[in-house]
Amino acid sequence: MINGISINMYLMLSTILFTIGAVGVMARRNIIILFMCIELMLNAVNLLLVAFSVLHHDSAGQVFVFFVMAVAAAEVAVGLAILSMIYRNIKSIDSDLLRNLKN
Amino acid sequence: MLGYTITQWLFGIISFLSIMFALMVVFTRNPINSVLYLVLTFFCIAAHYLVLNAQFLAVVHIAVYAGAIMVLFLFVIMLMNLNQDSEPQKTMVSKLIAGIIGGLLLVVLVGVLKGTEQIQLSQSGHSEIGLVKNLGRVLFREYLFPFEIVSILLLSALVGAIMIGKKEIK
């Protein structure tokens, strides 16, 4: 089904998605949205892994996507637990308020 | 159709949609709208997996991301009662700096990847590598040990989330 598409198009698409995620991490202060942008970056990498697995006719790339998904799920579970703990203590999810280590 | 095949049209439309939705995730002010746009982005990425003939991965992607992770995000946002008014905003200067740094990152990555060889994807005789039979064979033969390690990782994440989320640790 995918005849006529070169790997470079997938490289460009993944690059753009990864950059959007990185900009989101730098430009927003809501910690939940930072997590979502990290998910976006992980998904850009996943897409490229699948594209290269199709290019090389090798299933190993798609198996690695499973592992990335599992790590992302674990990260989100622990991250949101920490986040709800932060919210319980300082009643805010602003990442700029968390600077007790600064001075 | 203008010299493009149907697959190329499909790829172009899905790519455009996924980039648009990803931009909306970053630039929408209401966190709930951000989550919903991220779900749409994940559906577009699942459509990309279907175009790449990775059907099982597309189904797992929708089930895990749109079904589990994003519901968790929505739960947390609704528990904290976040909306547009409580949304913290960065100053204009730091947003501008973030945009400049992101643009530079994009320019560098595109510049590095632009000169690479144009290799066409083709699936002559290999269209079944994304099916569950093939993936299961690879996963349980060559990657059995990482698979077990991942189960331990998920278990420890579960225990960690419960320990952190408890009211007070005795």
Image: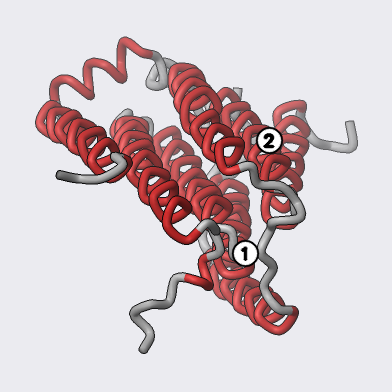
Packing grade of label 2 (10 A; few <14, some 14-19, many >=20) is some
Q: Nearer the viewer, residue A87 or A12?
A: A87
Classify A19 as above or below B83: below
Q: Is residue A82 above or below residue B144?
A: below
- Residue located 63% across and 68% down the image: A27
The three-letter code of the residue at mark 2 reads Leu
Residue B28 seen in the figure: no
- Dot 2: chain letter: B
Query: Which quarter of the image is occupied by the C terminus of chain B?
Result: top left
Asked if A38 appears above or below B158 in the picture, the reply is below
The coloring applied to the image is secondary structure
Residue B151 visible, this angle: yes
Residue B129: name its quadrant.
top left
Depth order, front residue of A2/B79: B79
Measured as percent of width and height from the top left, residue A76 is found at 40, 42
Element at badge 2? helix
Viewer-nearest residue: A102 or A40: A102
Tag 2 residue: B36
Residue where numbered disc 1 is placed: A28
Q: CA distance from mark 2 to mark 1?
A: 17 Å
Q: Residue at x 65, y 35 (%)?
A: A4
The residue under label 1 is which amino acid type? Arg
Residue B51 placement (x, y as % from top left): 60, 26
Residue displayed at 57% across by 23% down:
B50
Chain of the residue under the numbered disc 1 shown in the image: A
Q: Position of residue A96 (x, y in %)?
A: 53, 72
> What residue appears at the point 44 percent right and 33 percent down from the top-left corner?
A54
Kindly indicate whether the residues beneath marks 2 and 1 are on one polypeptide chain. no
